[in-house]
């Protein structure tokens, strides 16, 4: 099928390779496991919580948590899928080995249904035609940010899934008012950053997303110049 797929919960367990006696499959190994997913031509996104990668990779949860970066890389490489490893500092792993570390979210989001909200955000972005990698990064960031805004508004200690979904919906609506620019050179990108910096209000946060060489550093240098700072002090946001 050429349709993008998001797999969560038992959708992941169908491809589990649990060690004997562990996980809901009680040691039964799926034929082909993650290699079956690698045969798909359409984009696939997996959204395991910390206990599920072990069943996918045939190891224990403790081994996964001991090295989350290595675990998400292995799962992405074996499955050929984008893997969103949920937890404190959710990770987004690509089959290429690249891993993004999300900085939004809080412990209050460890509540029933929180992962379902993330799956819904991912599916919604894919249904609207977003690039799958962009959709994964954006959905994970918005999911965590929605939780942070809920806590800032006084919700807690746990953030109910319904509250999280409502907060995320508000963020999605705000995103619809975004402006888009295209630049053709480093100089144009710096000039854009400088111009936008003059429009920034205090306590605003800029989210930079892009591959290596996309122009994030040039843009950040322009923002620094627009704020009256030394652009030479800006280093690559990627690193």
Image (spheres, helix red, strand yellow):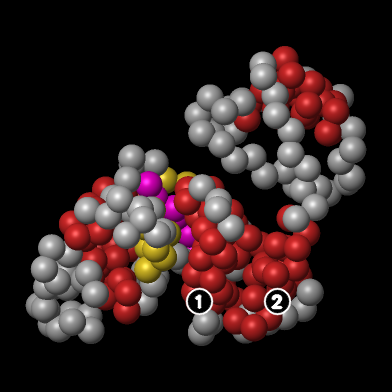
Q: Does residue 157 show up?
A: no
Quarter-wise, where is residue 156 in the image? Answer: bottom right
Above or below, 236 relative to 78: above
On screen, residue 151 versus residue 56, left or right, reads right
Instruction: Please tell me which residue is depicted at 33% across the width and 63% down the height of the picture.
Output: 65
Q: Position of residue 99 (x, y in %)?
A: 42, 45
Which residue is at the far front? 1
On screen, residue 115 versus residue 97, left or right, reads right
Q: CA distance from mark 2 to mark 1?
A: 13 Å
Residue beneath disc 1: 116
Front residue (pair 124, 216): 124
Instruction: Please tell me which residue is depicted at 68% across the width and 80% down the height of the picture.
Output: 163
Q: Which mark is residue 166?
A: 2
Q: Position of residue 187 (x, y in %)?
A: 72, 15
Judge whether residue 214 is colored magenta: no
On screen, residue 99 versus residue 60, left or right, reads right
């Amino acid at each position: 099928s050429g349709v993008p797929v998001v797999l969560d919960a038992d959708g992941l367990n169908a491809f589990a390779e649990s060690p004997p006696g562990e996980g809901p499959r009680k040691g039964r190994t799926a034929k082909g496991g993650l290699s079956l997913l690698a045969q798909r031509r359409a984009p696939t996104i997996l959204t395991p919580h910390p206990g599920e990668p072990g069943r996918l990779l045939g190891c224990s949860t403790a081994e996964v948590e001991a090295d989350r970066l290595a675990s998400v890389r292995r799962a992405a490489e074996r499955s050929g899928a984008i893997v969103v490893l949920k937890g404190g500092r959710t990770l987004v792993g690509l089959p290429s080995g690249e891993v993004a570390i999300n900085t939004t979210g809080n412990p209050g989001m460890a509540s029933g249904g929180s992962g379902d909200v993330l799956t819904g955000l991912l599916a919604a972005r894919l249904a609207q035609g977003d690039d799958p990698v962009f959709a994964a990064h954006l959905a994970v960031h918005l999911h965590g940010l929605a939780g942070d805004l809920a806590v800032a508004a006084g919700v807690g200690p746990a953030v109910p899934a319904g509250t999280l979904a409502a907060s995320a919906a508000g963020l999605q609506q705000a995103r619809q008012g975004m402006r888009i620019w295209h630049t053709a050179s480093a100089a144009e990108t710096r000039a854009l950053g400088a111009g936008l910096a003059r429009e920034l209000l205090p306590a605003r946060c800029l989210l930079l997303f892009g591959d290596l060489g996309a122009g994030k550093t040039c843009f950040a240098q322009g923002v620094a110049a627009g704020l009256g700072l030394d652009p030479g002090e800006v280093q690559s946001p990627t690193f």
